[in-house]
Image (cartoon, rainbow, N blue to C red):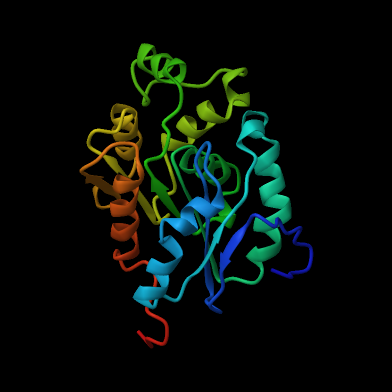
Amino acid sequence: MNLPGHRPSHADIWLRQGADTLLVLLPGALMRPADIEAAGWFEQVRQRGLALDLCAADMDMDRIIGGAPLAELQQGLLAPVRVHYRQLWLGGISLGGLMSMVHASAHADQVDGLCLIAPYPGSRLVANTIRRAGGLAHWRPDAVQQQDPEYRVWHWLRSPPADLPVFVGHGRDDRFADGMAALAACFPPASRHLVDGDHDWPAWQRLWQLFLDQGHFPVAGDPG
């Protein structure tokens, strides 16, 4: 995609339909953008005729903990393309969902919606810290925790923007289901979705289809 200031990655995969809304999807750990395309997610947008551009972004998850990939994503992709779209949604699968929230917590004014497919809720250390504090309503991050992206996400989840459209869902038998349920509970009931399945593609496929059918994006050419 040749946009001024955009440093393209040959591994990014795009669906460009001339829409005024872009959804950038962040893959999960050990996942590449090509996996999202192979799962038919681009084709499902086409089949529905949605006025939506889609980008499965290439991210080096081996370096994710240091925060560098998110900074590069912001500077190399999100900031440059933002001026070309009326709305910019961010989403992802598993770790990609967590990273979407990390970015939204730091750049709230640049994200118009979130699509969180089985978002990784963070480590047991984080969950236990919050539990020992008496729950999310009572926990406050200390100076060290404020430097950790997982803790920052949970601090943001204490009061996410009330007007931010969010889709969050996971499988009933997902091995991270308890943490995901706690995460989803931070959003309005209408945002939460539970399907049959585990932390795997069949469940993620069901959730993606539910998301596309929610009505967040108009059908191309529909004046309404």
Q: Position of residue 114 (x, y in %)?
A: 44, 52
Residue ID at (60%, 48%): 107
Residue farthest along the right direction in this orientation: 5
Q: Position of residue 153 (x, y in %)?
A: 50, 34
Whether residue 115 can be seen here? yes
In the figure, 4 relative to 101: above or below?
below
In the figure, 66 relative to 75: above or below?
above
In the figure, 36 relative to 98: above or below?
below
Q: Which of 11 and 133 lies nearest the eye of the viewer?
A: 11
Q: How many marks?
A: 0
Q: Position of residue 209 (x, y in %)?
A: 31, 60
If the image is split into quadrants, where does the N terminus sit?
bottom right
Whether residue 113 can be seen here? no
Q: Position of residue 131 (x, y in %)?
A: 35, 16
Residue ID at (43%, 14%): 129
If the image is split into quadrants, where does the C terminus sit?
bottom left
